[in-house]
Image (spheres, grey):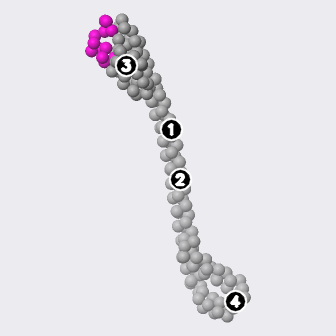
Amino acid sequence: MTDNELAIAERLNEIERWWNGASLNADEAHRSTTAIQPTEIVNLCRELLAALAQERELKAKLDKLVCDTLATRVKCEKELENARERNASLLKLLVESVIPYEALLADAESRKWIAPSIWGAMEECRDKVRALIGVSPSSRDAQGERT
């Protein structure tokens, strides 16, 4: 509780004791009858109502923030799921597109009838795809024994 809220609570307790006619010692009785005026009671009630309204407003803002955050998280999770599915599809397509190159590059006879520039482009494409998917070059390629 804030100091202001504690002061309001203390004053409301005084009002309640005074209102219920609780037995008060002389100092409390004097202070209660002289310190608490009807206008002060009204002012305290107004202040309390304003504080409660502010509390409700802050709680509503917090609730909205939490709801918005959860909605954003759900949306981002869905977007992430879609991106992962798309990436998996693209990776599959990429690997499938390189399979013909792999077969040709593995065939020594093919090198005889494929132009050197095209052969080099096929090797480059294969190597890039392998790097993207994290596959190391074959042992023959690693040793530089390309056929």
Say what amino acid the circle numbered 4 marks: Leu
Q: Which residues are magenta?
A: 111-122
Say what amino acid the circle numbered 1 marks: Lys
Residue 114 forms part of the magenta stretch: yes
Q: Neighbour class for label 2 at 10 Å: few (<14), some, many (≥20)?
A: few
Residue matched to label 1: 78
**Which of 83 and 41 lies nearest the eye of the viewer?**
83
Q: Is residue 72 visible?
A: yes
Report the side of 117 relative to 133 (left or right).
left
From the top left corner, tell me how far across and down residue 9 is, in percent.
Answer: 61, 77
Residue 60 forms part of the magenta stretch: no
Circle nearer the N terminus (4, 2): 4
Q: Is residue 125 depicted above or below 77 in this figure?
A: above
Residue matched to label 2: 66
Circle nearer the N terminus (2, 3): 2
Q: Which mark is residue 143?
A: 3
Single out the mark in the foreground, 2 or 3. 3
- Distance from disc 2 to disc 3, alpha carbons, whole Å, reads 58 Å
Secondary structure of residue under mark 1: helix
